[in-house]
Image (spheres, rainbow, N blue to C red):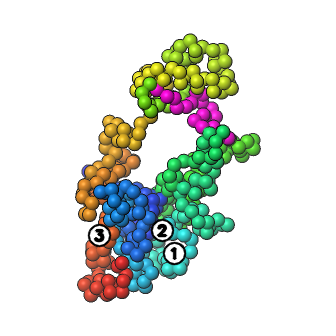
Amino acid sequence: MAPLPLAGVKVLDLTWVVVGPAAIRVLADFGATVIHVESGIKVDTARTVSPYKGGKPDPAMSVLSANMNANKLGMQLNLSTEEGRGVVRRLVAWADVVTESFTPGTMPAWGFDYESLKKINPGIIMMSTCLCGATGPLAEFAGFGNLGAALGGFVDYWGWPDRSPAGPAGAYTDYVAPRFIASSILAALEHRRRTGEGQRIDLSQAEAAMHFLSPAILRYGVDGVALPRAGNADPVMCPHGVFPCKGEEEWVAIACQSPALWPRLAALIGEEATNPRFDTLLGRRRHSAELDAVIAAWTSQLEDDEVERLCQERGIAAHALTTSVEALAEPNLKDHFAWVQQSVMGSIPVESPRIRLSRTPGSVRRPGPALGEDNDHVLREILGMGDEEIANLAIAGALE
């Protein structure tokens, strides 16, 4: 098998929580050597979030951290000590890329601003990401992915017209920004390959996430109309919604992505769907509440998988809603997780790479490390330190 495409790329990963570690894991999945630095003094928030192996809160048993940091080497350093910062400077000299996701001002306070890193390694690429970017009036804005969704416009846009704004679940921007981070680093690496020049990447998580609101933003830019909250409705497709089925808490999502599909769905539903008001897309949109009631009356007589089958056979997009547990049982997702041995937790599930390359597929080679699991390897094998130097670091509290 061919070497992984990012073999030889070296990354010093100072990011924490989800957005940074998830992005840098993409590089690790495809062969980059990534050293992920954490501290036992201020534990990474990802280690304080469930699920935990065994069910009891314990930073050492965080399955989330083991997923976000799979395929990485784990190092424990106390950057509040000069000795700990000294180790980082030596790792900067080793690395091709340095990544961080602290509040703006943190890295300069440690002496790790981009200009300082360039003096150590002129070709270094530095990727910095925070909620609103490192510059501008909101650079010091406090928050995380949940609030990023509010700042980016998602919360106001998401929900039902007769209810309060809802917004997407969870730390939304933490899960959509990583693809922009990973691609920007790859672009910077290619630029350096061509020119020898490193550069700094400043990525605002809220701005990156706004890419997913492009239709609404473009609509406002064209005619000044702000799209309202519309529940499951779509501004173009109709019908487009989620409908109840025969079983308890069974639902099916149906969308006619083109007007030509409506007659096929109407034929399945029967006489109630032949109302002339539903003949055109404009008519269906004007009478969408009545249309949804007609569709719901039909779906509620059938099991969700039966509705899915009938629609799919006719080229209509329809899918039974599944819980997260049911989704993992789907044959299409059978390779989504790899079960691997973690040094503290034992056997745990780790998500496989989301991208499949035919010649150079990534894989889960190891789970995220325990805190400081690879200190000895990094200090001895990568930085060439001996027993006395490592002992002095420990005495100074640099390895805490």
Label 3 crowding class (10 Å Cα cut-off): few <14, some 14-19, many 20+?
A: some
Residue 237 colored in magenta in the image: yes
**Rendered residue at 39%/73% (across/down):** 39
Q: Is residue 206 left or right of residue 122?
A: right
Q: Earlier in the sequence, mark 3 or mark 2?
A: 2
**Of labels 3 and 2, the one closer to you:** 3
The answer to the question of whether label 2 and label 1 lie on touching residues, with beta carbons closer than 8 A, is: yes
Q: Earlier in the sequence, mark 2 or mark 1?
A: 2
As drawn, 368 above or below 91? above
Q: Which residue is mark 1?
A: 107
In three-dimensional space, the C-alpha distance between marks 3 and 1, rounded to whole angstroms, equals: 24 Å
Q: Earlier in the sequence, mark 3 or mark 1?
A: 1
Q: Amino acid at mark 2?
A: Glu
Q: Amino acid at mark 3?
A: Glu
Element at label 2:
strand
Q: Amino acid at mark 1?
A: Met
Q: Where residue 282 sits: x, y (%)?
A: 68, 25
**Rendered residue at 34%/64% (across/down):** 58
Q: Where residue 358 sits: x, y (%)?
A: 34, 45
Given residues 89 and 294, the one toward you in this image is 294
**What residue span does the magenta drawing correspond to?**
228-245
Q: Where residue 396 sits: x, y (%)?
A: 36, 86
Q: Which residue is mark 3?
A: 373
Residue 203 colored in magenta in the image: no
As drawn, 358 above or below 399? above
